[in-house]
Image (tube, helix red, strand yellow):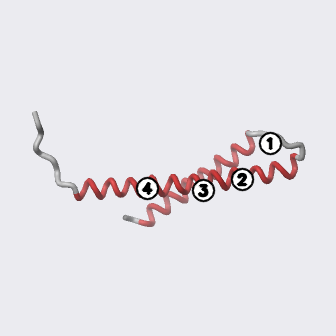
Amino acid sequence: MNQRKIWFAGVVTMVIGTGIGLTLAKIVEPPYTSDLYQRQRLERIYMLVCGVGGLLVGTTQEALRQMQEERDRNEPPNNNRDL
């Protein structure tokens, strides 16, 4: 398996997830009265959770894709069709 492709896919989806987390933090209003402190903390939490989630999804998806390609290469073709 190509580790560089796996980590690249993870980093790309992590950046996308971080952007989604930042967007969610801007859209969702915090239920707190102190907007100055709580909004900054909420943005960091959303960015961290979505970034880690993106990293996990990206690396897992790319690893599964590579394992599927490897399995398809090593599996003998099935030419016996039952009619």
Identify which amino acid the numbered label 2 is placed on.
Answer: Ile
User: In what quadrant of the picture does the N terminus appear?
Assistant: bottom left
User: Whole-Å distance between the Cαs marked 2 and 3?
Assistant: 11 Å
Amino acid of disc 1: Pro
Task: Measure how far apart labels 2 and 4 are at the Cα level.
Answer: 26 Å
Q: Which quadrant of the rendered structure holds the C terminus?
A: top left
Q: Is residue 64 left or right of residue 7?
A: left
Q: Nearer the viewer, mark 4 or mark 3?
A: 3
Which residue is disc 1 drawn over?
30
**Residue 77, percent from left and from top:** 17, 50
Q: Nearer the viewer, mark 4 or mark 1?
A: 1
Q: Which residue is mark 3?
A: 52
Mark 2 crowd level (few <14, some 14–19, many ≥20, 10 Å Cα): some
x 74%, y 51%: residue: 43
Marks 1 and 2 sit apart, C-alpha to C-alpha, by 12 Å
Residue at (67, 56) in percent of width and height: 48
